[in-house]
Image (cartoon, rainbow, N blue to C red):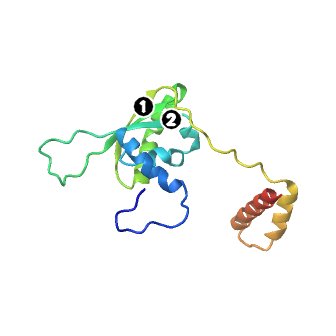
Amino acid sequence: MIPPRGAKAKKGARPLGDFVAAALDPLAAKRGFGESDILLHWDAIVGERLAQVCEPVRLQWPVRPPKAPPDAPAEPATLHLRVEGAFALEAQHLAPIIRERVNARLGWRCVERISLKQGPLEKRDKGPKPPAPPDEAALREARAATAGVADEGLREALTKLGANVKAAKG
């Protein structure tokens, strides 16, 4: 992204993630998405299990009446999802939850309806595999280090973190 004329550019290297959304937004707009947020964060919106069997295809907005005032609120859209065949019934039952999660992510009532179409999903890279669980020695050492923490939930979280760090250093 090129800074506006007269603005100072940030110095130094910037993470690639800073450029992804800006690069994808025009492509997402061709499919009806105002921004790439739904596409980029689909796993986080619907959960990993559901994201493995369905994906957003496009967001279809209703046609505005020609005599509608310019300041009239936009009518909600229909989110079209592609679902693997055997999971269409489950996705149909979960449609209200999906709609609410998408709307919560976007911060307004953007989606009113969900349309499902059965078909194969696009192949997606699942990313790096999660690291192997830490060994018993790392867990024992982490438990010993966190023995003085009174809150059980915090102690357990710190133990897991410590064991993973110890295993990574290895």
115 vs 167, nearest the viewer: 167
Residue type at mark 1 is Leu
53 vs 93, nearest the viewer: 53
Image height check: is 74 above or below 140?
A: above
At 13% from the left and 42% from the top, the residue drawn is: 66
At 72% from the left and 66% from the top, the residue drawn is: 152
Q: Quadrant of the C terminus?
A: bottom right
The residue indicated by pointer 1 is 116
* Mark nearer the N terminus (2 vs 1): 2
| Residue 100 seen from this side | no
Q: Residue furthest left?
A: 67
At 40% from the left and 53% from the top, the residue drawn is: 106
Asked whether the beta carbons under mark 2 and mark 1 sit within 8 Å of each other, the answer is yes
Mark linked to residue 54: 2
At 48% from the left and 50% from the top, the residue drawn is: 20
SS of the residue at dot 2? strand
